[in-house]
Amino acid sequence: MSNVFLVAGPSGVGKTHWIAQQLQQYPPSQQIAYLNLGAGSFPLDASYLQTLHPKLDYLSDDNAPVKLVEHQGATNPIYIEVGFHIALDSLVLPLVDCHNIVLVPPKGPKTDWHHWPEADEVIVGVGTSNESILNLQMQRALL
């Protein structure tokens, strides 16, 4: 089985939550790599995941190509989260063997992710309910 997991799906379906669940299977001493394609300069998901696993190595856009190859060579688990706005057919990664996982919403219309031919596994994600959106509250704080 591959040590590289590419996790894709629409916004809010639970990609980061699924990765967080997977991190629980590794001992605290295990080095793990994480790359969030499309996160930009504000890696919120990476910061959250680093609180869950002490050896999580967040790969930035600057060092990702080299670090991905290093981690794969060392057989460290690598989790690559694909932002919802990235076209799946545009992905070109320097990886030899990659397990492609797609999370899809539990309800609603079929999306491009439902029909991605490169998917090795399709998982029903968490989705959001209309009630959670109706009861949404904004929190503000001074920085």
Image (spheres, rainbow, N blue to C red):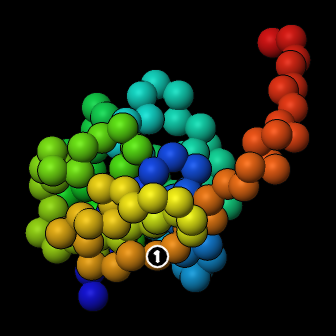
- Say which quadrant the C terminus sits in: top right
Whether residue 7 sits left or right of residue 52 in the image: it is left
**Of residues 71 and 23, which is closer to you in this image?**
23
Whether residue 115 sits left or right of residue 122 in the image: it is left
What residue is shown at x 27% (from left), y 78% (from top)? Answer: 120
Q: Tell me if residue 75 can be seen.
A: no
Residue 9 placed where, x, y %?
Answer: 42, 56
What type is the residue that disc 1 sits on?
Answer: Ile
Circle 1: is it few (<14), some (14-19), or many (20+) Cα within 10 Å? some
Is 52 drawn above or below residue 137 in the view shown? below
Residue 55 placed where, x, y %?
Answer: 54, 61
Q: Which residue is mark 1?
A: 123
What residue is shown at x 86% (from left), y 11% (from top)? Answer: 142
Whether residue 115 sits left or right of residue 34 in the image: it is left
What residue is shown at x 74% (from left), y 49% (from top)? Answer: 130
Residue 77 placed where, x, y %?
Answer: 38, 71
Q: Quadrant of residue 33?
A: bottom left
Q: Tell me if residue 77 can be seen.
A: yes
Residue furthest to the bottom = 1
Residue 1 placed where, x, y %?
Answer: 27, 88
**Of residues 125 and 56, which is closer to you in this image?**
125
Residue furthest to the front = 109
Query: Tag count in the figure?
Result: 1
Is 135 drawn above or below residue 68 in the view shown? above
What residue is shown at x 31% (from left), y 34% (from top)? Answer: 61
Is 108 drawn above or below residue 37 in the view shown? below
Q: Quadrant of residue 75?
A: bottom left
**Disc 1 element:** strand
